[in-house]
Image (cartoon, rainbow, N blue to C red):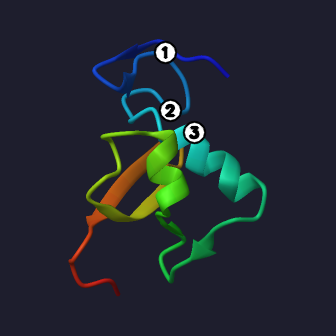
Amino acid sequence: MQFNTRNGIITNPGKFEGEPVWVPYFWDCYLDGGAEHDDEHVLVFDVTDEDRAKFPGMLDDVAQVRLYESDVGFVHAETVARGKWLP
């Protein structure tokens, strides 16, 4: 799917609006069964070198991506930096 972006942030109205361009990629990984769930129903992804290669300069310092879907269907992302403690 193609998105309009500004400075790496999706500007199209919809599920991913206002999130980084890599969020739909991880959401698709979840739909394909590639995510762990934590106790708070957050989708947890360990970022790989392959992921970083797909989004150069955007995930370089990221160890983990966490996604959650709001009650109204928007997907939001948080990241955990490399070298930080991971729960």
Q: Nearer the viewer, mark 3 or mark 1?
A: 3
* Disc 2: which residue: 16
- The residue drawn where x is 21% and y is 78% is 84
Closer to us: mark 2 or mark 3? 3
First in sequence: mark 3 vs mark 1: 1
**In 3D space, how far apart are the residues under numbered discs 3 and 1 (Cα atoms)?**
12 Å
Q: Is residue 69 visible?
A: no
Amino acid carrying mark 3 in the image: Pro
Q: Is residue 47 above or below residue 10?
A: below
The quadrant of the picture occupied by the C terminus is bottom left
* Comes first in the chain, label 2 or label 3: 2
Badge 2: residue crowd in 10 Å (few <14, some 14–19, many ≥20): many
Q: How far separated are the C-alphas under marks 2 and 1?
A: 8 Å
- The secondary element bearing badge 3 is classed as helix
Mark 2 falls on what kind of element? loop
Instruction: Tell me, yes or no, if residue 20 can be seen here.
Output: yes
As measured in the structure, the alpha-carbon distance from the residue carrying label 2 to the one carrying label 3 is 7 Å
Marks 2 & 1, CB-CB < 8 Å contact: yes
Quadrant location, the N terminus: top right
Dot 1: element: loop
Which is more toward the observer, 71 or 84? 84
| Residue on which disc 1 sits | 12
Q: Amino acid at mark 1?
A: Asn
> Quick check: 34 above or below 4?
below
At label 2, which amino acid type do we have? Answer: Phe
What residue is disc 3 on?
A: 24
Q: Position of residue 58 (x, y in %)?
A: 33, 42
**At 50% from the left edge and 63% from the top edge, which residue is drawn?**
48
Q: Is residue 72 above or below residue 65?
A: above
| Residue beneath the point at 44% across and 62% down | 66
